[in-house]
Image (cartoon, rainbow, N blue to C red):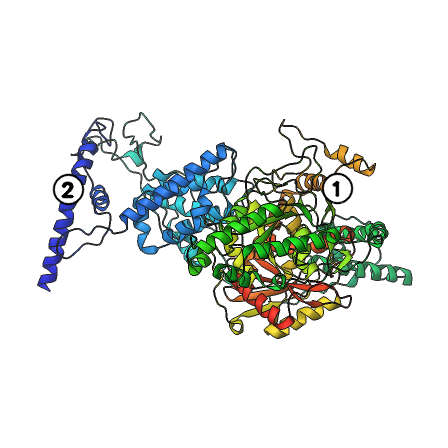
Amino acid sequence: MDNSCDDEAVSIHTDSDASDTFVEAAQEKKNETNIVYEDNQDGTNEGWERGQFMTDFDIMRARKKAESTRRRKRNHSPVTNENEDSIEELLDQMKQAAAQDRQLNLESKPATKKIAILHKVMPQLFKKDLRQSFLDHNLLHVLAEWITPLPNKALPCLQIRESILKLLSSFPGIDKLYLKQSGIGKAVMYLYKHPQETKANRKQAYVLIADWFRSIYNISTDFSAMSLEERRQHDMQHVPYQHKPATPIVVPSTVAVEPDFWLFETNPKPIGPGDKGWIQRARVPLPSNKVYIVRPQSKIAVNTSSMPKKQSNRYEMSQNNREACERTYKFSMKIEPESSTMSSPLNALVEFLRLIYAKCYRKVVRECNQQMSFAIRRLLRAAMCVFSWFVMPYSQCVSGRIERRKLPPIENPLLRLSATVLAERIRKGEVRSEDVVRAYVQRCQQVNPLLNAIVEDRFEAALEEARQIDQQLAKGTLGTSEELARSKPLLGLPVSIKESLAVEGMSNTAGRKLREKKVALSDAPVVRQVKRAGGIVLLVSNTPELCLCWETYNQCTGLTRNPYNLQRTAGGSSGGEAALIAAAGSLLGVTTDIAGSSRLPAMFTGVFGHKPSPYVVSPYGHHPSCDDENWGSFFTPGAMCRYAEDLPLLLEAMRDPEGTPVTLNKPVPIGALKCYYMENDGPSGLTRPIDPDIVHAIRDVAAHLNAQRVNLKRLRWTLDISVCKMLRMKNVETIYSPQANGKPDTTIKREVFKYLLGMSKSDLPSVMIGPMQHIVNNYIPQSRLDFLDSQTEKLRKDFIDLLGTDGVFIYPGFPNTAHRHYRIFHKLVDTTYMMVFNTVGLPAASCMVGFDREKLPIGVQIVAAPGQDHLIFAVAKELERRFGGWVAPS
């Protein structure tokens, strides 16, 4: 017992010695001031001056600052925090990232430095044992820099704002000195008041501001944790009572009384600045002549639940229903007052019909709560039906003129091997890269005249690169087979690229008819990664104009056809890639996905197409481009191949080294997965019914995986939330975007008029994107957009809570298999089956599971939580084993 006391005394003494220098420095700083605080105007001192005195609180603060941590060794020597250097290095990296993002923003480039290190920084900042150390190193000032708007007034990335607000909420209590010095309050207040901030972030910012306000103003009472009786008792204790003396107070004339002593009784006029006795600091308010009355409350508790309620008659119920419908739909209908006796049968019939009308509309309100109005949704569905009357004959005419021919059979056995097998054989020298590339070049020359999928090829250059790789492998200069498997997993394999992605020296027009052909001056980041992994770029494939359609056609290259039936579409916008891969004209394909562009073509052509989690692959280097902060979470390059085992191989080569970290080759036991499925979107009342063959396929997959059927009601709103979010993106490159001279080539009215006259050089989707953006940005109320944003976040949370880290979701990709050309235009709302997963930022893949009655491929979507792409790959391999996978078209 005595030893412990001695240790404590020595420890305290050591702490005091360690902080002497800081205390002396603070004392000298205090002595510099010459301000003297007085309690009266006469200059009477109270025995000390503030300029020459340090309170116990000031000494404690100086000692705390000197210690930097509470942990001390028992040998009387201070412990140095081993994490101090790491903390300083981490904060320096965050400061540099913020400064680099500001500089990139000034140069009109994407600010990606902060989002690149976000996944490395946040786990460290959330460590509870380092919180005080981070605060001592001015962490709040760094966080304020991260969430401060960029020089062009744009908000930082949504992931950054969400992570930092969540981090700030995790701190139990922040000292007010840190809050005042860092400026974090201004940054959070800016987010709270910004109109484009999400509802969830504004709510979290409001909670932070409220908590910090109470800390700064020393408000400790927590009314939210108090019951009603406790709040009433608290109010009663703080009621100011005026104690009136029983007899008037008489001041003796013989006694010299100080004026301040009789201030409350003899001086009815309140003192103010300049008066004697005025104290220039905060103090308790003086009593006034006002009398505050606490009104008595009844102590009798009346229970009204058992009292009989007045029963409404049929007439009153119909009137109430009619008024509710009018308030909901802003629809007025004049009803003449009638007698409650229903004198005639005609009146009774009219009243009955009105009652049914009111009940029906109230039911719609309950089911479609705050969705697009029932009438507008039905009108849109009717418009699609009317539009189909014009589309169907034109589609039948165009498709009928295409000769239905079969593709040449696959003769070279190398074309039937997966990329995983070929890569291993090339590394071991069992197969030459030149032979593989030559086989695919010959196959492209056979099938492209029928498919029309290639925009521009580089066959000779690809063969030369393959020869060089073979020579280097023969000499052994590239390393061992194991080293090449890690550093160059695609060594010697041919890869095709979607034309909208930049490949140096190749066409990059994205299907747009321009005066001068656009040629890429450098590789897109994803193409650079593929080349770095040893891949050989073979060609660039066809895409619709500016990737704005779910069928692949344009006025430059023409129409791409489905290899299983040339009269059917290959889908879009990656239809060129899908057609070539399904016809064995390409081994691996790099695609893009903004609204199902990788998954729909894969479903129509019977291959595997994957949309990865956001920021796993760099979204830059694409035409059309966009600098909106949500672009990277909505758009991403994707992977396409014939065999499921090639998906992780290709995606591993495509991934951005500074992007979101994911594990792609992690083994997953299928029996341990939690599987869920839905056969449609609710239904929403807008999309068409799912084809019976697809429904049977989904049920077969669900039965094989032992999946549980669920009903996510918010999937009914996919059209509203997906279209509004996509069309609200800023600075998306379209035919109406400003050119190099700062002026657009055309306007909306002019281009629509030219298209109606048949004089436009653009296709219908490119023409209509302008009017649709104008309608969404100018005619939809902000309250409606805020509601849709909140529903997006709730739907994303529903999926993450449902799937977790061991769940997958089985869902249709489209209501039907590959249809005839141009029929997508009366099925545009059906694309929301795929677009919704771009909206909520989930990885998804289309997997081949069989054929329908017309011998066309059937595909289903497999979805997982963000960062769980390996679960999708495991399910894709299992479905390929169970249902057979890709079958060569014949």
Taking 172 as reference, is 243 above or below it? above
Q: Which residue is mark 2?
A: 20
Residue 294 is marked as none
Q: Nearer the viewer, mark 2 or mark 1?
A: 1
Q: Quadrant of residue 89?
A: top left
Identify which residue is drawn at 25% across, 52% down: 82
Residue 676 or 587: which is nearer the viewer?
587
Taking 625 as reference, is 3 above or below it? below
The answer to whether one can see residue 784 in this image is no
Q: Quadrant of residue 271?
A: top left
Identify which residue is drawn at 48% across, 57% down: 662
Identify which residue is drawn at 28% across, 47% down: 85
Residue 468 or 268: which is nearer the viewer?
468
Residue 555 is marked as 1
The answer to whether one can see residue 513 in this image is yes
Query: At which x and y percent is residue 80?
Result: 21, 50
Q: How many marks?
A: 2
Q: Give how far apart the Cα atoms at labels 2 and 1 are.
A: 81 Å
Quadrant of the snapshot with the C terminus: bottom right
Q: Answer with left or right where residue 473 lies relative to residue 463.
A: left
Q: Amino acid at mark 2?
A: Asp
Q: Answer with left or right where residue 49 lies relative to residue 759.
A: left
Secondary structure of residue under mark 2: helix
Q: Quadrant of residue 458?
A: top right
Secondary structure of residue under mark 1: loop
